[in-house]
Image (cartoon, rainbow, N blue to C red):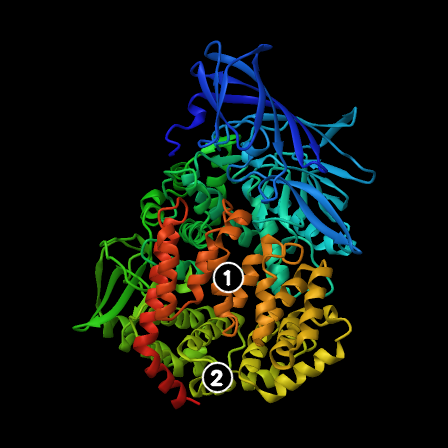
Amino acid sequence: MDELTRFYNTLQPNHYDIYLDIDRSSKKISGKTTISGIAQDSKIALHQKDLSVSAVQVAGQPVPFVLDRELDALNITLPKSGKTQITIDYTAPLTDTMMGIYPSYYEIDGEKKQIIGTQFETSFARQAFPCIDEPEAKATFDLAIKFDEQSDETILANMPELRVENNIHYFDTTVKMSTYLIAFAFGELQNKQTQTASGVKVGVYATKAHDPKTLDFALDIAKRSIEFFEDFYQTPYPLAQSNQLALPDFSAGAMENWGLVTYREAYLVLDPDNTALEAKQVVATVIAHELAHQWFGDLVTMKWWDDLWLNESFANMMEYVAIDALEPEWHIWELFQTSDVPAALRRDATDGVQAVHVQVNHPAEIDSLFDAAIVYAKGARMLVMVRALIGDDALREGLKNYFAAHKYNNATGADLWQALGDASGQDISAVMNSWLEQPGYPVISAEVLDGQLTLTQQQFFIGEGQDANRLWQIPVNSNYEAVPKIMTEQKVVLGDYVTLRREAGEAFYLNMRNDSHFIVKYDATLLQNILVNVDQLDAITQRQIIQDLHILAQGRQIAFSEIVPLLLRFAHSNSKIVNDALYAVAQDLRQFVTPDSDEEKNLKQFYDKLSRQQFERLGWHAKGNESLDDELTRPYIVSAALYAENSVATTQAHDLFKTHESDLQKLPAEIRVFIIRNEVQNHGNQTLFDDLLLNYRKTSDAGYKQDLRAAITSVTDPKLVSQLVATFKKTDVIKPQDLRGWFGNTLRNAHGEKAAWDWLRQDWDWLESKVGGDMEFTTYITVAASVLKTAQRLEEFKNFFNPKIDQPGLTREIKMDTRVISGRVALIASEKNAVNQMIADNI
């Protein structure tokens, strides 16, 4: 079943005329597509999926064709090779899988409505029209759409609408682009518009279920992002419009369709008066990410899916570059440190993980490439390393030349390294290929051996791993001049430590600013020298110390118990990024205790010791003129105080709930989830459960929905847990796009773990029918593996998933996640007693 021959090799299209007649009531599409191009052979193949083809014509004459359902192929015999024009008549279904052309469902005042949208990445354009559905097959497109149009409906596409004739909407010819970037949508929509300094029309669209003011934030960020990228890339935005559209049903976070970017509602519309700052930051970075793609991905596109990272890694870095420029007071790179960096370090430490650049040998493997922690987060770290090496001037010059050389065409990773290398005068390719082509990352052991300061690199694993003697070219970023700029060898001896320490006048550090993708294991001498003045260190260095020790403990290179007393040294930090690292370790300590045991009582006392003073300082409500760090730290502290059963915190949470019981949505967004969750855990009953679930169904506020989900899934009553899990398959309550969050939250709840785990195994076939083939399907396995921690669960995991191990797209995930659970089980068995003893000794 391997797609060994790419269809582009048989036909190079240059233009499509696409006519679609869409009937929502019958869920049927009638289409006619004419493709102009160059055929290399008289026998060609087009991509199609679930199309019913009635006729294929060339020059007005019918030609033979055969549908191959297994290969998604429409095989056509042409009269001759060379310049050709092929017309295909067909019908197709509207899907309900959030792929291809599909309806999104929503309600206004109890009335059910729908809008039609598209999702064609990775290979779903073939469900809408026959095409060469490969990134390299760029062409121009003329789109004409007719639909069962009602009054007050809007239709959007990549390009502006030219005219309407006989109820057919005709859109301007696109620029040369890949099929996966085609998009359109129609339905009852509201919008707000603005224009950039260069004249690009920018719009934000959403259903009328939302308050109009919830479009304002996105409109501002979108406009300023385009202006920033035009300046930074030194390349004009190539289209006349840039519309942002929120779809009620959307599997991914967002999609960079050229000129019509689509989003999950949670990542575009927000209440400007009551949304937590971090939620605003996330929305802003998602918008900037998609608009970065308008150049990097759309204007210049990867040649094949093995270079997916070329699109995603770059956009992932540029979202932070852009928002840092637009909102400098946000210190947005701290969000990169607390989200992307730890995600990449955890995932990339599992043996069997994919490299950033990975071959695609089977069509089903394309969607499995979208490993967010690798292709997005790790890849972004690679590019952050490059940026630190060459500086922004060379980066901008290289990108300007890259866009000029490859615009409206395709490129590979080598093309990018060449452009950046030429601009900087550095051999970027040599450095980056060691990161691009190899999975994993190194730990550098920094030791004083026989008086000599010595560095050694070796691949780091969490759980069992097969050491393949890999070497990386590591930008080590040290504060000691004796350290090379790039460490290329397995071992480097730097010189006499006492002399180096005296000359430097400060402790020895590696990976300053935490820009490079490795961790450091300092020996006792070096670590103690760092910790002596730990209170005087900058926040990112403090964070890095906790982060690296945490990961080393997860990889069993140090004892987990060693970190416990160290946490107390950082407990009074006012820095958000330090508290994030601290409470990540504290959260991990929970795996060593059994719920409601004496050990958990001790852990709660330890949490109280960590958080009490901070809770007394910060409280529940923002103070006048408080710092952004305080605003962003409060959620960590109140969450810890509630877990610790701090009586003041739990009482105040209950009082706040009662005060706002008639309209919980108006609770301050920064603390709302903790107040409602505390109520469910400590005062929960059937009435509260029903009320919250009803609120979830009725609200259009994505942030409030997320808070309600987190609260409802924390139920403790077995009867309510059963009701909760029974709701998973009720798509009118929980949309398939949101189900993974419901499942994951319930699984993490000690009272819901068994029910959620049983549900996943019992209803796997149903789940596959709903989201199978989607790029996030395999992440259900990842979520399960992130929670399960006993030998019994490990065996259950193996028994259920091993029979599926040869299923295309699942193989790597099942093998990796078996190692993840196995490593956790071994860690807990080995260190549980020591960790619990250390907790008891420090309360």
Label 2 near label 1: C-beta < 8 Å?
no
Residue shown at 59%/32% (left/top)? 128
Earlier-in-chain disc, 1 versus 2: 2
Disc 1 to disc 2, how far (Cα)? Answer: 24 Å
Per the image, the residue denoted by label 2 is 596
Q: Position of residue 643 (x, y in %)?
A: 54, 80
Question: Which amino acid type is shown beneath numbered disc 2?
Answer: Asp
Question: Which amino acid type is shown beneath numbered disc 1?
Answer: Trp
Residue shown at 49%/33% (left/top)? 135
Q: Position of residue 24 (x, y in %)?
A: 71, 37
* 101 on left or right of 530: right
Disc 2, SS: loop
Q: Quadrant of the C terminus?
A: bottom left
Query: In the rendering, which numbered label is found on residue 759?
Result: 1
Q: Quadrant of the N terminus?
A: top left
Q: Position of residue 615 (x, y in %)?
A: 59, 83
